Image (spheres, rainbow, N blue to C red):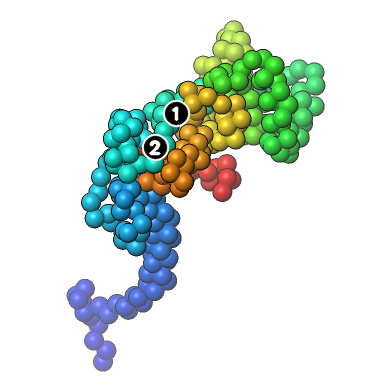
Amino acid sequence: MTTVPNTPSQIHRPRKPFPFGRLLAWLGLALILLISVFPIWIVLKTALTGSRSLFTEAASLWPSEPTLVNFQRVLGLLSLEEVQAAGGSGSSVNFLNAMKNSVVFTGLIVVGQTFFSAMAAYAFARLKFPGRDAIFTMFLIAMMIPGIVLFIPNFITIRNLNLLNTIPGMIAPFILMTPFAVFFLRQFFLSLPKETEEAAFLDGAGPFTIFWRITLPMSQGPIATLAILTTIGMWNEFFWPFLIAKDEASFTLPVALQVFKSQTPQGVPDWTGLMAGTFIAAIPVFLLLIVLGRRVVESLAFSGTK
């Protein structure tokens, strides 16, 4: 006669196999995280190391005497004598002014490009006018033109307008719209239901009112996605500001870093100062990832950018 267990402790439950696959996945993720973070740590460690002990402590993972003097001198908080006494090479770039220019450069482009691209995308998605599809096809074709091809005509135009070394000259090619932004938002606007807009139209609302008060509030996710992607791209933009900004007062952070690297008063680059400037330039991107990390990942996945 077979005995039937009548309590939970008597019920035999098969043991779950050890999750080797999950363990390997976590180990793989930890290795990828370590490889990704290690260069950033080397940048910070070099920035915290004194110039005289840079090469003697190259194999160490932590500076024996951490110091903030490299950050102070690249931010212009020390005199030239104090910089040279601290082991600096005498390279001099105003990173505070460059950060201000980067904030203005990036902020104006993000606001302008997002707003104008949204308006153009709404027009292509909802309004009916002659040549709409042909113009949109031209936008799609423009996506296939390499940006480097447009640098020379854009530079000649900006030079003829006497906008060299100015913020308007740096933001002019980017502030209106890009084919990718228009295509990205148009595809989303097409997926919105038309019934709400038609009801607003029957109540007397015009196209701009419908766009401003109905369509934009319903499109906060894609617009935030576009704004984040534009912010990351423009904050790291180097070549166009490098062409336009020839005076130090107009440098953005990527240009300032390049100029600082090329200055070698003592024959070798100022590596500790350069790493301090690099870390300062990366701080806004770190903050963006910390505050809006999930949104950034969703944005990259949504847009297909890798």
Say what amino acid the circle numbered 1 marks: Ala
The image shows residue 192 at horizontal and vertical percentages of: 59, 29
Numbered disc 2: secondary structure: loop
- Whichever of callouts 1 and 2 sits on the residue coming sooner in the sequence is 2
Can see residue 78? yes
The image shows residue 117 at horizontal and vertical percentages of: 61, 25
Residue 153's disc is none
Numbered disc 1: secondary structure: helix
The image shows residue 303 at horizontal and vertical percentages of: 57, 41
Q: Quadrant of the N terminus?
A: bottom left
Alpha carbons under labels 1 and 2: distance apart = 18 Å
Q: Does the CB distance between marks 1 and 2 fall below 8 Å?
A: no
Label 2: few (<14), some or many (≥20) within 10 Å?
Answer: many
Residue 90's disc is 2
Q: Residue at x 73, y 26 (%)?
A: 153
Work out whether 85 lies above or below 165. Answer: below
Report which residue position mark 1 lands on: 98
- Left or right: 122 in relation to 52: right
